[in-house]
Amino acid sequence: VCVCNATYCDTLDPVVLPTPGTYVKYESSKAGKRLERSEGSFQRSLHAPDLVLTLDTTQRYQKVKGFGGSVTDAAAINILSLPETAQDHLLRSYFSEEGLEYNLVRLPMASCDFSLHAYTYDDVPFDYELAHFSLRDEDTKLKASGGKGIPLLHRASAMSKRPLSLYASPWTSPTWMKTSESFVGKGTLKGQAGDKYHKTWANYFVRFLDEYAKHNLTFWAVTAENEPSAGLINNYPFQCLGFTAEQQRDFIARDLGPALANSSHRDVQLIILDDNRLHLPHWAKVVLEDEEAARYVDGIGIHWYLDFIGPIQDTVVPTHELFPDYFILATEACIGAHFWERDVILGCWDRGNQYSHSILMNLNHFVAGWTDWNLALDLEGGPNWVKNYVDSPVIVDASEGIFYKQPMFYHMGHFSKFIPEGSQRVGLVASKESKKTDLEYTAFLRPDGAVVVVVLNR
């Protein structure tokens, strides 16, 4: 790990493009290199190496939306628990040109498991007019306004040379709208699409966007629901709201789509699924083969938690082939979520490898970007009100006023810093003479004309 405090933090130089005939290499290694920069020039070699990768920029694939992480209540609490200059070092490490240059930020709409308690923005029963709708301290003191000086999202935005794309995901509706009348456990919206519960829930999205707009924060997108399958599981342990693919289709067609389209937020994009990819291509077919729903949808979100039982060739690839006009974005991933995994392991290189492997696999199969889960957690992997502790690329030790940048952090940087929004994946093939290799690799043509090749050697 790399240790940062109020006075010291390792930084990166802004990327400077190499002159023609030369290249720049950035290398990280288990032995201790962390995005170490070196330069070289191309030469014709007589000795053919074991592996030759040939670039073909005439083969063009998907364009990139970006890379980033999530500002949960827990992430915000941890970042703000540091001395102010250390907070700046942490935010700069992620968002500035001397850091990873993240451009995607996912925000839970009200609480999730990484909150101190369960809440929504309107917990007053049967308030169909949403007269009592209001942001909470978690938003106004931590993320959007007030608080210590300028809040996190504005600070991140000010440090970032690239425009940030924020997107929001709800975990649960108010309990009075739910069949379970509870934040947790199996439960869906009461009634059916088109009724007062569904209309009110759709308007809740609009009100959320309205309130954040008052704090000068606008959103690139919303997801229709975080992990809609979770709310269909008995005794689900934290905030959820169940939808089948059919229920999501009808909710979008009759309620959410029209509510957004008729609001001042009609340009906010709508992402479906936002759940494990094994629901594909079924989920996409159900929603996007319905013209009424499909016209409101822009993209499909996927989580990584059950990737081992949903191979990408059987899920994401057929979805892209069926619906090439809709982007596919990886919207959540973290390590430590499975019961057999330790929560936080400081300095674990293999966890960095797991991030890179997932990102490469996704990018090579039409996915437009990758979003990590919590930007920062404490040494326990929290706070989390149901003790669902996990790992994070940045771990904060508030008692010492320091934070640790883990291997996962630097692995993220090999993608986020060098593959900006608008880059397009291009062909990269191993020559026939190449010995069989365990290397994983991808290539992108950037908007500025430079080519980026990322290679992982596990």
Image: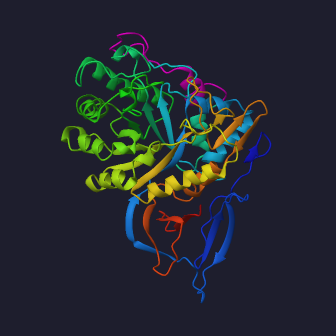
Quadrant position of residue 140: top right
Spot occupied by residue 269 in the image (x, y as percentages of width and height): 36, 41
Residue range highlighted in magenta: 122-149
Magenta stretch holds residue 323:
no
Spot occupied by residue 143 in the image (x, y as percentages of width and height): 57, 30
Q: Is residue 169 left or right of residue 347?
A: left
Spot occupied by residue 165 in the image (x, y as percentages of width and height): 47, 43
Q: In this view, does 378 lie to the left or right of 370?
A: right
In this rendering, the answer to whether 71 lies above or below 33 is above
Residue lying furthest left: 291
In this rendering, the answer to whether 159 lies above or below 318 is above
Q: Can residue 72 be seen in this view?
A: yes
Q: Which residue lies at the image location 50% right of the left edge and 33% below the top edge?
A: 216
Q: Is residue 346 left or right of residue 386?
A: right
Dominant secondary structure, magenta: loop
Magenta stretch holds residue 136:
yes
Spot occupied by residue 318 in the image (x, y as percentages of width and height): 30, 54
Q: In which quarter of the image is the C terminus?
A: bottom right
In this rendering, the answer to whether 59 lies above or below 81 is below
Q: Which residue lies at the image location 52% right of the left edge and 58% below the top edge?
A: 419
